[in-house]
């Protein structure tokens, strides 16, 4: 007896067919060329490549990728629009959830967030969600055609936002859209926070950040730069001046140091200073910009995170032989794999399982090297990573005229110091309610690195989004209108 296959057996599953399409690579600058310039390294997808990559998404009914996104973007919806060739529609879907898609598509650790939950990653490679987010945002920015956001009727409420970084920008966009008058106060001369001063041009072009800042201005947000809350005015004075609520997003800009001998020598920088001078103050363009130039010949960066990679790669582009000293092994490095890979490709030298003991100086107090100790890994510490243990008698010197310390940052203390009613933790972070992000002072909310300590751009945005929701509820007594 012959048997007849069912229709399902005869027709291959479209989902299985899509899953067999390989993940599409991102074109990049050649390492030999890019180490000499500050142009962006990844070049972005073409329209055809973006559509092909988007077609890999199997549109799960219960998408795990959404659970992995700190701002809860409904990822299948914007990817579906790209697959259909509706690129502007994809951007509009993204804008329902995030104020900074072009930024997040470049700097977010998708491999440990949304992409780590993609079902395709269980047996192969996940959908390139970050690359597709970047594509949609870049297409819309270059081609235009994106309608201005629809704003709710004016509420008559006025909100102050202290700090114009990722958390502040997120809150400003949400509250302006819901009809509130929003005024931002930024200490530096350009809005953007760490997006402007911390992340190099070759990883995040500054014109992209300013495009998003200008989008806020189009929505009616007022931005005061060179305005230091805690010096010019206090939070209490803002409330007394007619603001109905305040959001504090001053970040974690206080650098940590090693505490070793000669750390105050000429040629030692915090990563904050080094990157701020290079990125925001344009020291890389001396003499066109009057900021004193930084001209390292042999640079040693201490640390293993993304900031360390940024500093070492910036030093390389300024003409230095650039090295990274890190006390654990490569497997324990907190930096993104992509950033480590790019640094290696470009020629950054890695001294793993190595820890600085002292800065070596000459008679003029100038750096000539770093005396280091070899380390070996012991038992795991509180972070879950194996604790580095000194190998006695293993001292050696790494030649250097520039040392960049990139071992982390503490919260900016200025606002808490001038607002004693706002409770802080022993680490200097502002304590907030876990749900609402309100501080111990009624009507004052906070989010981003000033609350969590130094973390990612997207986590700051996630806190900002949550805070905006509860700020609207505080101001109006009801939930915000739906998009």
Image (cartoon, rainbow, N blue to C red):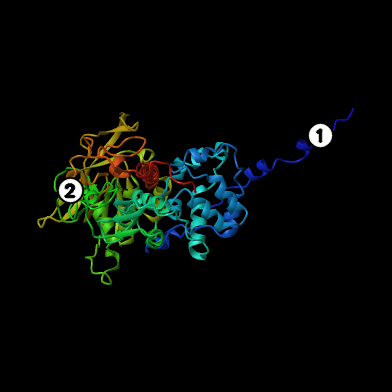
Q: Which comes before the other along the chain, label 2 or label 1?
A: 1
Q: How crowded is mark 1: few (under 14 residues within 10 Å), some or many (20 or more)?
A: few
Image coordinates for residue 220, horizontal then vertical, percent: 38, 60
Kind of element beneath mark 2:
strand
Residue closer to the observer: 176 or 248: 176
Q: Can residue 270 be seen in this view?
A: yes
- The answer for how far apart the CA atoms under marks 2 and 1 are is 76 Å
Q: Is residue 436 above or below residue 53?
A: above
Image coordinates for residue 465, horizontal then vertical, percent: 40, 45
- Left or right of 259? Residue 13 is right
Which quarter shows the N terminus? top right
Image coordinates for residue 259, horizontal then vertical, percent: 17, 42
Q: Is residue 353 above or below residue 40?
A: above
Check the image and name the residue furthest to the right.
1
- Residue carrying label 2: 359
- Residue carrying label 1: 5
Q: In this view, does 109 lie above or below 91?
A: above
- Left or right of 226? Residue 133 is right
Residue 339, label in figure: none
- Rendered image quadrant of residue 62: top right
- Rendered image quadrant of residue 421: top left
Residue closer to the observer: 337 or 424: 424
Image coordinates for residue 363, horizontal then vertical, percent: 9, 56
Q: How many marks?
A: 2
Identity of the residue drawn at 63% across and 54% down: 84
Kind of element beneath mark 1:
loop
């Amino acid at each position: 007896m012959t048997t007849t296959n069912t229709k399902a057996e005869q027709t291959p599953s479209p989902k299985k067919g899509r899953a067999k399409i390989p993940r599409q690579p991102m074109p990049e600058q050649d390492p030999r060329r890019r180490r000499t310039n500050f142009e962006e390294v990844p070049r972005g997808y073409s329209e055809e490549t973006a559509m092909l990559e988007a077609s890999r998404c199997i549109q799960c009914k219960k998408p795990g990728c959404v659970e992995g996104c700190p701002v809860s973007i409904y990822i299948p919806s914007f990817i579906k629009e790209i697959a259909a060739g509706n690129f502007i529609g994809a951007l509009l879907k993204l804008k329902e959830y995030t104020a900074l898609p072009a930024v997040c598509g470049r700097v977010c650790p998708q491999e440990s967030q949304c992409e780590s939950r993609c079902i395709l990653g269980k047996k192969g490679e996940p959908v390139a969600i970050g690359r597709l987010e970047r594509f949609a945002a870049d297409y819309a920015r270059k081609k235009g055609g994106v309608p201005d956001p629809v704003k709710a009727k004016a509420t008559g409420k006025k909100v102050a936002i202290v700090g114009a970084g990722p958390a502040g920008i997120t809150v400003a966009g949400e509250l302006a859209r819901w009809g509130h008058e929003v005024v931002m106060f930024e200490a530096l001369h350009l809005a953007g926070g760490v997006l402007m001063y911390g992340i190099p041009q070759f990883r995040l072009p500054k014109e992209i950040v300013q495009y998003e800042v200008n989008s806020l201005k189009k929505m009616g947000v007022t931005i005061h730069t060179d305005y230091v809350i805690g010096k010019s005015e206090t939070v209490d004075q803002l409330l007394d001046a007619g603001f109905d609520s305040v959001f504090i997003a001053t970040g974690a800009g206080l650098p940590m140091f090693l505490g070793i001998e000669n750390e105050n020598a000429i040629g030692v920088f915090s990563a904050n200073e080094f990157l701020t001078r290079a990125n925001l103050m344009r020291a890389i363009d001396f003499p066109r910009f009057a900021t004193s130039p930084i001209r390292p010949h042999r640079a040693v960066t201490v640390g293993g995170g993304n900031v360390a990679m940024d500093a070492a790669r910036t030093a390389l582009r300024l003409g230095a032989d650039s090295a990274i000293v890190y006390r654990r092994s490569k497997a324990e490095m907190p930096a993104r794999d992509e950033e480590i890979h790019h640094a290696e490709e470009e020629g950054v030298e890695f001294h793993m399982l190595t820890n600085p003991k002292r800065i070596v100086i000459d008679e003029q107090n100038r750096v000539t090297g770093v005396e280091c100790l070899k380390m070996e890994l012991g038992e795991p510490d509180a972070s879950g990573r194996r604790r580095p243990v000194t190998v006695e008698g293993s001292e050696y010197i790494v030649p250097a005229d520039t040392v960049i310390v990139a071992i982390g940052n503490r919260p900016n203390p200025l606002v808490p110091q001038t607002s004693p009613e706002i409770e802080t933790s022993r680490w200097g972070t502002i304590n907030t309610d876990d749900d609402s992000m309100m501080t111990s002072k009624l009507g004052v909310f906070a989010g981003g690195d000033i609350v969590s300590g130094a973390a990612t751009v997207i986590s700051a945005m996630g806190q900002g989004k949550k805070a905006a929701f509860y700020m609207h509820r505080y101001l109006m007594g009801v939930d915000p209108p739906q998009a």
